[in-house]
Image (spheres, grey):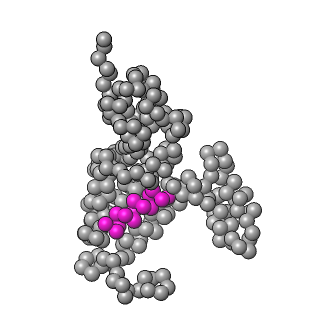
Amino acid sequence: MPAPRKFSREQLRTAALTLVDTHGLAALTMRSLAAALGTGAMTIYNYVDGREGLEGLLVEAVLADALPATGPGTEAGDWQAEVRRLAEANWRAIRAHPDVIPLILTRRITDEATLVHGEALLRALARSGRRGVELLYAFRTVTGFVTGFAQAELAGPLSIAPDEDVRSITDRARALPADRFPYLIEIAGAAAESSPSDEFRAGLDLLLAGLEQLPTGPGAGRPGPGAASGFGTP
């Protein structure tokens, strides 16, 4: 009797992601992954533990696509350029696989690809002079922007389905009552003339400009209970 075939983690990830990109998330099962790899379903159980393990493969595969960006980057002093490079690589990797976005948003991710990318982003942000809680705030803000932007493209008020034209955004907006939603109608028109890449880069520029303006060092962390919020009342 021949010995069971052995597979690398990368082979499993690639096969799982190809299945989902082609047939959708529901198509990924132990049996379908085994068939794609030319083996039996019981062999796959040697590598992953049920549905949760399969979904973990997908998240790893997507985030591994951003790993090349964690290599040698810009000059040490240009932390903003480095953050832009890493953030955009991560965003492009995520948005290339829309069926996996809900998993990235809801799973606790601890694989090596995620940790390596996170460490590279932290190194870049640390060059802004932030440490400890300030570095944590900056890290959460940048990573939240990346995943949130990808999610907004998929399901936000200005999102479009794969089979829709960008003009569908303005068509939906024109159907809204102008007296109640004037600004949604306004930005829908702008979105029809824009592109996701332009919007992502502009949003990231806004975020980095804010980080540049905020002070760093002792006393520059989260404001105390009596501090003004900057948004009306304390």
9 up-or-down from 128: above or below: above
Q: Give x and y (percent) for residue 201.
A: 47, 60
For the point 42% across and 61% down, the residue is 144
Left or right of 174 in this view: 49: left
142 up-or-down from 18: above or below: below
Q: Locate residue 183: give its quadrant.
A: bottom right
Q: Give x and y (percent) for residue 116.
A: 29, 50
Is 144 part of what is drawn in magenta? yes
Of 50 and 79, nearer the camera is 50
Query: Is residue 78 visible to the viewer in this orientation of the structure?
Result: no
Quadrant placement of the N terminus = top left
Q: Give x and y (percent) for residue 185.
A: 68, 66
Is 26 part of what is drawn in magenta? no
User: For the view shown, which residue lies furthest in the top direction?
Assistant: 1
Assign the magenta stretch its main secondary structure. helix
In magenta, the rendered stretch is: 136-149
43 up-or-down from 158: above or below: above
Quadrant placement of the C terminus = bottom left
Q: Locate residue 184: give its quadrant.
A: bottom right
Q: Locate residue 182: give its quadrant.
A: bottom right
Q: Give x and y (percent) for residue 58.
A: 42, 41
For the point 30% across and 77% down, the residue is 221
Left or right of 140 in this view: 171: right
Of 102 and 85, nearer the camera is 102
Left or right of 175 in this view: 128: left
Of 214 and 105, nearer the camera is 105
For the point 67% across and 63% down, the residue is 189
